[in-house]
């Protein structure tokens, strides 16, 4: 195990966390991102973050890895200079190219979306035809600035480019005549955390022996932060929406419902996201009310209220129904009872979500770590424990940068054991 630096580029800011071999945080740094689609700002932010780490700690860092938003891509030339605009993770201007791919792929595939990296590559190649260009994901390019090698990506970033991490190859359909011109632009893909080389940037006060590793995406980094590493362990994020991720021995996909799997070592991280989540709570309660009413709740007395608390019509997971209407009636006069009904319903939907993943073939659920704004609500934790029927606890670490530092330490490859689960949750 090594001292490592994890760097996370999110949508509005970037964060760096240095950790010691035992996973203890040595230093952190945070910088805002004002123009999330400007590589020059990313480059300056990357430098600033590294220089923000106190120099005594910086010199001890043996490995660095970077995570960034998935499917944020652009073209750069052989020197690594951007030669197209950046298409951010949620940019759907490449929409028309989905149809091109539909003619090649006969079954549903993750790339058949207006925001997939492959659809964006088709758009970029049409609008910015350049000799010797390569496609880079945000995380690939930021790592390139440190190790100097272009054209390398990782399983996680490359999944929405069409790369098959089970076969460790691009699928045969890339040989279709429409797609062959793309081949020279495709990155070589390696397992996340692979050591790619020594740091070549000499003016950052890093040890010349510091190694730079292949990265990951921000949401997988957040999962890795929890320390979950055994099959059957899961992380639920109680943010604006409810996001479930379960570590499974088998790969599971139901793309119409938005369920797919990323490869983690020799396991699979199966994920699904409901449109329900904690955002609905903010519509009815202030943060102070949420805390006070939750503390007054008697979770051993179920309300019998059965809501489906969507913000608007339409759900994908665990029920795939674009017409599903929000159900928030009957609304009791007592706000504490109303909140309890909402938390019970969200707990029920979470349990249905894990049941659905298992029905589709994921490994049995053993325990659930919790992240996101709703994680620290003890009443909700107790209700979830009742509905899920497995131990539930708060993740000790939730920052993506922390997960990426663990990735750089080889967490994925060595299969380090999970943090001890709090006894009170059993
Ligand atoms: P995101 O990153 O998805 O926007 P966060 O992880 O920051 O979300 O979580 C924000 C959510 O947490 C808000 O929707 C808010 O309603 C919810 N939240 C904040 N405090 C509490 C609480 N005490 N109990 C339940 N939910 C809470």
Image (cartoon, rainbow, N blue to C red):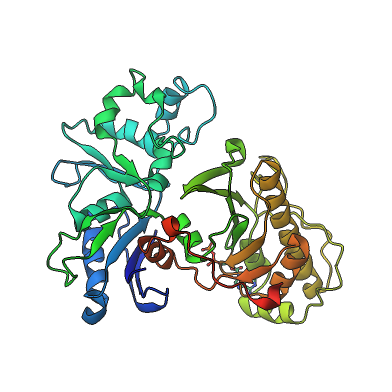
Q: Residue at x 25, y 65 (%)?
A: 45
**What percent of the width, then of the height, locates residue 198?**
20, 59
Q: Residue at x 70, y 82 (%)?
A: 292
**What percent of the width, then of the height, locates residue 164?**
43, 36
Residue 408, placed above or below residue 106:
below
Tell which of 148 and 1 is nearer to you. 1
Tell which of 391 and 13 is nearer to you. 391
Q: Quadrant of the C terminus?
A: bottom right
Residue 15, placed above or below residue 298:
above
**What percent of the width, then of the height, locates residue 342?**
74, 64
From the viewer's perspective, is 358 left or right of 134? right
Q: Residue at x 40, y 28 (%)?
A: 97
Q: Quadrant of the N terminus?
A: bottom left
Q: Is residue 164 visible?
A: yes
**Image quadrant, ligand 1:** bottom right
**What percent of the width, then of the height, locates residue 411?**
43, 61
């Amino acid at each position: 195990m090594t001292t490592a630096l994890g760097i996370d580029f999110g949508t509005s800011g970037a964060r760096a966390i240095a950790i010691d071999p035992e996973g203890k945080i040595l230093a952190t740094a945070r910088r805002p991102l004002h123009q999330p689609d400007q590589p020059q700002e990313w480059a300056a932010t990357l430098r600033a973050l590294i220089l923000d780490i106190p120099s005594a700690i910086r010199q001890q860092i043996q490995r660095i890895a970077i995570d960034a938003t998935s499917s944020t891509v652009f073209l750069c030339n052989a020197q690594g200079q951007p030669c197209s605009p950046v298409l951010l993770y949620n940019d759907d201007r490449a929409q028309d190219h989905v149809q091109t791919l539909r003619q090649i792929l006969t079954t549903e595939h993750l790339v058949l979306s207006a925001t997939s990296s492959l659809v964006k590559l088709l758009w970029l190649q049409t609008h910015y035809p350049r000799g010797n260009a390569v496609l880079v994901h945000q995380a690939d390019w930021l790592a390139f600035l440190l190790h100097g090698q272009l054209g390398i990506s990782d399983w996680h970033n490359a999944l929405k480019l069409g790369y098959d991490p089970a076969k460790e190859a691009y699928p045969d359909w890339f040989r279709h005549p429409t797609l062959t011109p793309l081949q020279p632009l495709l990155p070589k893909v390696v397992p996340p955390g692979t050591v790619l080389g020594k740091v070549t940037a000499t003016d950052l006060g890093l040890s010349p022996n510091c190694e730079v590793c292949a990265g990951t995406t921000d949401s997988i980094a957040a999962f890795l932060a929890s320390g979950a590493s055994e099959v059957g362990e899961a992380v639920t994020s109680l943010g604006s929406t409810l996001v479930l991720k379960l570590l499974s021995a088998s790969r599971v996909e139901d793309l119409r419902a938005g369920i797919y799997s990323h490869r983690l070592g020799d396991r699979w991280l199966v994920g699904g996201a409901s449109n329900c989540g904690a955002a609905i709570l903010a519509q009815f309660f202030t943060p102070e009310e949420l805390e006070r009413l939750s503390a007054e709740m008697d979770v051993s007395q179920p309300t019998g209220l059965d809501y489906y608390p969507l913000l608007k019509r339409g759900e994908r997971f665990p029920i795939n129904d674009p017409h599903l209407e929000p159900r928030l009636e009957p609304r009791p006069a007592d706000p504490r009872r109303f909140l309890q009904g909402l938390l019970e319903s969200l707990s029920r939907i979470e349990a249905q979500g894990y049941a659905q993943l298992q029905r589709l073939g994921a490994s049995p659920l053993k325990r659930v770590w919790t992240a996101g704004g709703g994680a620290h609500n003890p009443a909700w934790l107790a209700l979830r424990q009742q509905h899920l029927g497995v131990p539930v606890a708060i993740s000790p670490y939730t920052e993506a940068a922390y997960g990426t530092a663990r990735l750089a330490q080889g967490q994925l490859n060595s299969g380090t054991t999970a943090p001890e689960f709090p006894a009170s949750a059993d």
